[in-house]
Image (spheres, helix red, strand yellow):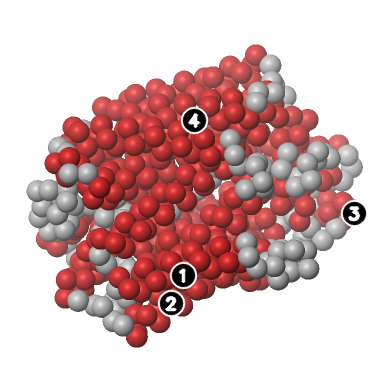
């Protein structure tokens, strides 16, 4: 990087902070901070939903998969995400929007107290927060890894720089700041992605390979196969189910985008827009990664530095800075949205249970608590980021695929399926049992059991078994021990019934510890 690249990067950071400061004026209460008061346009919600699903892991971990295996990086990652969101646009998006408009909640997990019971809500809240700390820690480590390739700064310095800047704008501006910065980041990564795509095509032409002849090169032999290596059919199906739950609200931050729109119809439209973006745009981003074995030689065994090396080699200064800004835009979008989601869960679901003072918070004190929680979460995730390459985690892609994907199902299944009428018989016993058994299955297949010849369980089973165990038990216990009480059925009907949201809305109770937690959201 030279002075021009640094100017682009510093200018980007400045714009992000400025957006946060401007968004501060739009945040008057916790509803504005967590769900934008239900006033976010569907197209902004859709772009924000799309951007908050990316991070620099794509340019490190998934770039390594593309470098090693080829197009399976798209087939087993962004394609199932696109399909999962498309399905969720009808199945989950309208129902999650009604959580805000009809139940007056500001956190995706608030409704669980009424849908199941307090124990279930707390189990999912605490496990979800802990998983998110690890997940976001991997994202910080990914962007710090890329930063070190270009600037030479240490991993810890890179984590500190990106974390602190993200903390400024997402803490003061809430979800509005997240969405507006993600809109700007979408434009930036669009320019950066196209620039990299064009640079790679020109380089292939200069080498006499050409756009269409690249797949015939020996270095790319077998890279055109959709399912190879550890990424087989079982992995694809498991990933589809996981992403169906995760990207429609199971990891909380995407649920907020659905809640932020004015109506269930607009939530559905925002989901469809996000699905289209996930289907089309990753192809442009992945193409340079698929071609990377022809252009660079990775210095790491997993190929995670290949995209950074290629960028450094092919782009002139200025454009290099723009692509680096694109790396930051993905990671900061995801991490800031996660921070906001976890702050919502803690201040709305956890704090009122563990603290009597929290039950009496007014709008001002609740907003202060939300901002403090955001900072604390970011600090904890940055601390975890410094340990991502330790023996406990092994590497970035291990954290993202094995830990996050493997643990996603047990946490998300009770939350997401609890929205749907066909699973109304599944109550607290089904939810807690499926959650606990899924976590135990994850531990079992990742640590005590050694089924494979290379000393471990195949990756596809590490990911799929916890999900399958949770799903099976959640459904089975619902039939064996139905717990569909009138109160729980009433919650499900409010979420599933079409019609006038204003007419169906229930009055907001007066205390944060009541059965339906109070917010100041306006229908």
- Residue in the picture at 31% in, 67% down: 419
Residue 126: x and y in percent read 37, 52
Q: How crowded is mark 4: few (under 14 residues within 10 Å), some or many (20 or more)?
A: many
Mark 3 vs mark 2: which is more N-terminal? 3
The residue nearer to you, when weighing 123 against 128, is 123
Reading the image, the residue beneath label 4 is 163
Q: In this view, does 446 lie to the left or right of 163?
A: right
- Residue in the picture at 56% in, 30% down: 159
- Compared to 132, does 224 lie above or below? below
Q: In this view, does 375 lie to the left or right of 463?
A: left
Residue 99: x and y in percent read 25, 57
Q: Is residue 46 visible?
A: no
Mark 4 vs mark 2: which is more N-terminal? 4
Q: Is mark 1 on a helix, strand or loop?
A: helix
Reading the image, the residue beneath label 3 is 218
Q: Is mark 4 on a helix, strand or loop?
A: helix
Which is more foreground, mark 1 or mark 2?
1
| Residue at the outermost bottom position | 480
Count of all numbered marks drawn on residues in the image: 4
Residue 272: x and y in percent read 43, 57
Mark 4 vs mark 1: which is more N-terminal? 4
The residue nearer to you, when weighing 317 against 392, is 392
Please tell me the numbered disc located at residue 437. 1
Q: In this view, does 1 lie to the left or right of 437?
A: right
- Residue in the picture at 78% in, 41% down: 300
Which is more foreground, mark 3 or mark 2?
2
Marks 4 and 2, how far apart in space?
A: 39 Å
Marks 1 and 2, how far apart in space?
A: 8 Å
Reading the image, the residue beneath label 2 is 473
Whether residues under marks 4 and 1 lie with C-beta atoms below 8 angstroms apart, the answer is: no
């Amino acid at each position: 990087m030279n002075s021009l690249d640094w100017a682009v990067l510093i200018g980007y950071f400045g714009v992000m902070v400025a957006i946060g400061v401007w968004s501060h004026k739009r945040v008057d209460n916790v509803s504005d901070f967590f769900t934008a008061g239900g006033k976010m346009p569907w197209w902004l919600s859709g772009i924000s939903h799309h951007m908050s699903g990316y991070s620099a892991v794509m340019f490190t971990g998934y770039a390594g998969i593309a470098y090693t295996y080829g197009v399976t990086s798209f087939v087993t990652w962004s394609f199932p995400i696109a399909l999962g969101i498309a399905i969720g646009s009808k199945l989950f998006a309208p129902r999650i929007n009604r959580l805000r408009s009809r139940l007056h909640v500001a956190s995706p997990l608030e409704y669980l107290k009424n849908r199941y019971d307090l124990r279930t809500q707390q189990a999912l809240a605490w496990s979800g927060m802990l998983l998110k700390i690890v997940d976001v820690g991997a994202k910080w480590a990914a962007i710090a890894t890329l930063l070190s390739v270009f600037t030479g700064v240490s991993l810890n310095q890179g984590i500190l720089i990106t974390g602190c800047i993200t903390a400024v704008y997402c803490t003061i501006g809430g979800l509005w700041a997240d969405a507006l910065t993600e809109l700007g980041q979408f434009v930036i990564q669009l320019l950066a992605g196209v620039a990299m795509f064009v640079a790679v095509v020109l380089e292939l032409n200069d080498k006499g390979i050409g756009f269409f002849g690249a797949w015939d090169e020996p270095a790319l032999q077998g890279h055109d196969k959709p399912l190879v290596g550890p990424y087989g059919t079982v992995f694809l199906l498991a990933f589809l189910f996981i992403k169906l739950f995760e990207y429609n609200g199971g990891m909380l931050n995407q649920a907020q985008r659905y809640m932020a729109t004015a109506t269930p119809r607009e939530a559905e439209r925002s989901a469809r827009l996000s699905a289209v973006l996930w289907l089309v745009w990753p192809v442009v981003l992945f193409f340079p990664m698929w071609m990377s074995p022809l252009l660079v030689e990775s210095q790491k065994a997993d190929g995670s530095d290949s995209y950074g090396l290629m960028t450094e080699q092919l782009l002139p200064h200025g454009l290099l800075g723009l692509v680096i800004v694109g790396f930051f835009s993905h990671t900061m979008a995801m991490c800031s949205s996660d921070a906001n989601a976890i702050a919502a869960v803690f201040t709305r679901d956890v704090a009122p249970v563990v603290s009597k003072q929290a039950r009496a918070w007014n709008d001002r004190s609740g907003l202060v608590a939300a901002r403090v929680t955001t900072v604390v979460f970011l600090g904890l995730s940055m601390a975890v980021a410094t340990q991502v390459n330790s023996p406990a985690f092994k590497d970035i892609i291990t954290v993202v695929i094995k830990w996050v994907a493997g643990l996603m199902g047990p946490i998300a299944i009770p939350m997401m399926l609890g929205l749907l009428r066909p699973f109304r018989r599944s109550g607290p016993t089904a939810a807690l049992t499926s959650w606990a058994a899924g976590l135990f299955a994850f531990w079992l297949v990742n640590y005590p059991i050694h089924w494979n010849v290379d000393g471990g369980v195949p990756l596809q089973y590490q990911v799929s078994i916890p999900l399958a165990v949770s799903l099976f038990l959640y459904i089975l216990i619902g039939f064996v021990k139905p717990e569909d009480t009138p109160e729980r059925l009433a919650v499900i009907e409010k979420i599933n019934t079409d019609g006038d949201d204003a007419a169906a809305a229930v009055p907001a109770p007066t205390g944060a510890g009541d059965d339906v937690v109070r917010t100041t959201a306006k229908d």
